[in-house]
Amino acid sequence: METFYSILPELIRIVICAACGAIIVFGNALVMGYAERKLAGHIMLRPGPMEVGFHGILQLVVDGLKLMGKQLVVPAQADKPLFMIAPLLAFAPVFVPLLVLPFSEKIQGFDLDVGLLLILAFASLNVLAILIGGWGSNNKYSLFGAFRSVAQNVAYEIPMLISLLAIVFMTNTFSLRDIAAAQSPVWFVVLQPLAFLIYIVAMVAETNRAPFDLPEAESELTAGFHTEYSGMSFSLFVLGEYANMFIVCSIATVFFLGGSSGIPLPYFEYSGAIWFLAKVYALMFFLVWIRWTYPRTRFDQLMNFCWKYLIPFSLVNLLITVVMVKLI
Amino acid sequence: MDVKSVVQQWQKMATSVEEVDYAVSGYDYSICLEGATVPAFASMMLEAGFYLVDLMAVHVEPAIEVVYQLAHVETRCRVMARAFVDEKGEIPSITDIYQGANWHERETRDFHGVVFVGHPNLEPLILAEEDVDLKPLLKTEKTLKDVAAVRRGQPEDEAAKPEAVKSPEQS
Amino acid sequence: MNVEVLEDERHHRFVLNMGPQHPSTHGVLRVLLELEGEYAMSLLPVLGYGHRCHEKIAEFKPAKSFMPNTARMDYLGALIYNHGYAQLLEKATGVEAPRRAEYIRVITSELNRIQSHLLWYGAYLLDLGAFTPIMYAFDDREEILDILEDITGSRLTYCYYRVGGVCKDIDDKFVTRTRAFIDRLRGRFPMYDELVNGNVILQKRLINVGDLTPQTCYRYGITGPLLRGTGVAYDLRRAEPYSVYPEFDFEVPTETSGDCMASFKVRFREMEQSLRIIEQALDKLPEGPVMAAKVPKKLKIPAGDYNSSVEAPRGELSYYLVADGSDVPYRLKVRTPSFSNLSVVPEMCEGMLLSDVVSAMGSLDLVIPEIDR
């Protein structure tokens, strides 16, 4: 009993964090789903959803209900267990990174010493989900999409990690809160512009979004790895994608854009979250913007870009950073 | 392109070369060929820089007539070359000369049943595999006309035409 | 996962069936691909899903009443298909369309050509993964459709031309709207140029992809923008002038590289030339009737064979008519440009990446119903 009372606050904290995580994941999907459709619409000279609610604001709620009501079709030749696991595997891991993100100085689930490693470890589970889904669908297009996805994500994780590593060398910590706090006079985007650029490119590729949306390149592979998915299993992939976007943009905010720092507001330890979210959604807007602007790259160009430019440049950047840190 | 020398070459291999009025018929030369000379004719045309516009068949009495339409990109010279298939319904393929003829020949095989000898893959193209013997564009006995009935032959047409280039008769 | 495998030395190839329902085949075309990794080692287009027996139908009804069928072959260049057919019968029967009718034909045909190119532009970029340009292209195209709908009564499968003229005269509203449209589209071109055509990703996807040479084009009978992209300035409006085209001043745009970028640019510049033609035609538009005075109800075609070739948006369109003296054609053969253009795919795309196959096939600007007829 003694021990129970001692860990009770921690348990409550976990429950609250999980609940907040769920709110963030679903709320983010609602906001981004609506924002993306609306932005895409306006970029494309059309109004986007207009029917349900004021300017279609309830469209995503209705869509969610519809998707829940739809039948889950499992193709006859599919590998059923794998086919069913894949969407869960794409969706479930996105909660963990949310626990360590410092939304403001005081709003943070857990401040782990290895926060960055935790995030990257769980983010790479997404690849596994796509591979399993593509393989389990027993569809040639899905398989192609899955293969492309694995090659792409494995390749782009490297420059992503190396560019973040440069920041870690400067701050000497993996803790996200400390990294955010280390940028009080100048944001790292000023000190590490190259790392920031590399991270942004890798971030787009990691989330499989246009112009690097090759795993689901619809003009080539119909819908890529999720060709066979319908109803809720499809929407779990979408939820996972938006949550992943949120996470990578949050990392960019923490590492390069000063986390929750900004013009002081009352109760800044908490209200800093407003700045944090503003930065995250600005980056997400950027992602949406380029998705609806650029054509898709070719697969070999994508890989060449990573191996021939991003990785060498990120390594050079890391080397320079290390030397500078040593000298100063 | 030198039209005159090309016409001379035609006259060597064709049974008849006739210049027709472009304003009425929409092409410049009408050439009648023996089935066997078609590949030689096609090679000559490719060398002269003609491109293959079309290849089609017309079902007339006494035999199915295969029509090759060719045109030149530099000078206006649109040619209709005709050749009858032999008794077995066969004619040499020109697919190895004009690769574009590949599909046209398969289509003609679909619609008229003309067999192009030397074609790499004479499978049905437009029709389904099971309709290989359908030959939908063949005329029935009632509708089949003699070749003379579909040739331009009215006297007033003849008068309007510029002087026709007749080739020396070949047997 | 059970993967179909081929026998013998090709056993490691992956057979992918692209189509008949696939976003980038633009219709019911099926392409059998044998892939090694991402590379397409052999391609086999399978046709016939949209075959509607147009040539057979033509042999069963009076030649005049085949006009609506022509529009259904190429739903994007319907007026130009009308034009070729009307011209064929006019040649054969000696009926002459009045000059005003010919001018109206040129104006509407060129509008139709721009409309077709705009749709290609949007759909091609969609193939390449750019989602937005199609909406801009459709925005412009919508204006053309509205203009044409006013005088022809339809928006896609027009049947506006008749033997001996056009069925309805144009009005002032048409003229003012068309002039406004010319200015509008001219204003849009710089935007297209800046936002899309200069994009580095687009250039990397198009340059040196799907190379053609003039010789290849002759062997396969490829015409239209693809041929002009290899440096041959062959346009039937110039090479075999028909209708009143000789009276207008326009260029035949060419590029020399012969790749997808070349035909992309050629099509783009053709739209500008079409605008020039329309502008001149509106300036010179003569007064008078739009139908020939005496067109017999039963149109007897003298025995003989007739050919009529026009420049369709995708290349050369030829009608070949064999007549036996009655009003029903003995044989009508339609030579459609996409048929010949598509037949080069097995040679052109061999050994290409899957993405390049999509990009090369998109540059052919395929309309499947005109291939199957």
Image: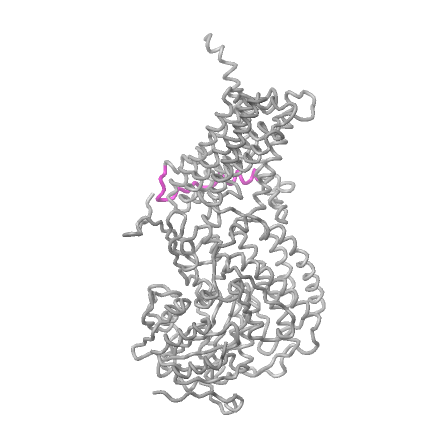
First to last magenta residue range: A60-80
Indicate whether residue C37 is drawn in magenta. Answer: no
Residue that appears at 36% across and 42% down: A78
How far from the left and from the top, in percent, is residue C110?
Answer: 61, 67
**Horizontal side of residue A109 vs C151, given as left or right:** left
C169 up-or-down from C135: above or below: below
How far from the left and from the top, in percent, is residue C336?
Answer: 48, 68
Q: Is residue A20 visible?
A: no
B65 up-or-down from C124: above or below: below
Q: Residue furthest top?
A: A2
Residue that appears at 51% across and 65% down: C227
How far from the left and from the top, in percent, is residue B95?
Answer: 37, 68
Q: Which of the 4 image quadrants contains residue A26? A: top right
Q: Which of the 4 image quadrants contains residue C46? A: bottom left
* Viewer-side residue, A120 vs A2: A120
Q: Residue furthest front?
A: A327
* Viewer-side residue, C125 vs A274: C125
How far from the left and from the top, in percent, is residue C123?
Answer: 54, 55
Number of labelled discs? 0
**Horizontal side of residue A182 vs B93, given as left or right:** right
- Quadrant housing the N terminus of chain C: top left
* Viewer-side residue, B118 vs A70: B118
A251 up-or-down from C264: above or below: above
Q: Is residue A293 visible?
A: yes
Residue that appears at 49% across and 77% down: B78
